[in-house]
């Protein structure tokens, strides 16, 4: 297995672990830009993007997330038009993924 394949499996398994852990909190799985996503009240708060997870966060949590190695504003189109509330946390930041998922869920739940 190539390194990239193992990174994808890590992100995929962590995404599923987060989804399973939040299943009792009215969280559903769906798609966002053709990628697997998690939603609450039909609004996305987390997305699987290659070997990264992407989170919709409030300004304070975005600032915190952007201090992580490789973190950046999410530009799903690749055309230098990042989505302002969405932060990509790449592989290597798995220790943050669970806590950021909780923060993203809270942000979207309270603002929709």
Image (spheres, rainbow, N blue to C red):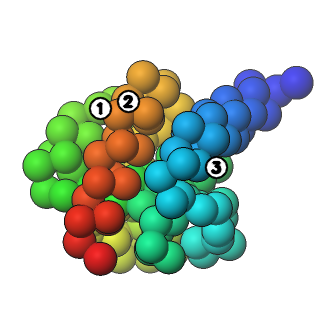
Q: Classify 10 Å Cα crowding around label 3: few (below 14), some (14-19), many (20 and above).
A: some
* Quadrant that contains the C terminus: bottom left
Q: Which residue is mark 2?
A: 96
* Quadrant that contains the N terminus: top right
Question: x, y percentage for residue 75?
Answer: 42, 66
Question: x, y percentage for residue 50?
Answer: 64, 49
SS at mark 1? loop
| Residue 45 badge | none
Q: Which residue is mark 3?
A: 50
Q: Which residue is mark 1?
A: 68
Judge whether residue 100 can be spotted in this image. Answer: yes
Question: x, y percentage for residue 74?
Answer: 39, 61
- Upstream in sequence: badge 2 or badge 3: 3
Question: x, y percentage for residue 72?
Answer: 33, 50
Q: Are marks 1 and 2 in contact (CB under 8 Å)?
A: yes
Q: Residue at x 18, y 39 (%)?
A: 64
Q: Classify 10 Å Cα crowding around label 1: few (below 14), some (14-19), many (20 and above).
A: some
Q: Residue at x 75, y 27 (%)?
A: 6
Judge whether residue 15 can be spotted in this image. Answer: no
- Looking at this view, is 89 or 28 the one in front? 28
């Amino acid at each position: 297995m190539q390194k990239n394949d193992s990174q994808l499996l890590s992100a995929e398994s962590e995404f599923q672990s987060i989804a399973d852990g939040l299943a009792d909190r009215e969280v559903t799985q769906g798609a966002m830009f053709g990628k697997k996503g998690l939603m609450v009240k039909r609004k996305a708060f987390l997305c699987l993007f290659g070997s990264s997870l992407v989170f919709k966060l409030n300004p304070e949590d975005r600032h915190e997330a952007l201090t992580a190695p490789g973190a950046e504003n999410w530009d799903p189109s690749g055309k230098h038009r990042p989505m302002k509330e969405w932060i990509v946390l790449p592989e290597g930041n798995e220790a943050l993924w669970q806590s950021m998922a909780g923060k993203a869920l809270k942000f979207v739940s309270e603002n929709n």
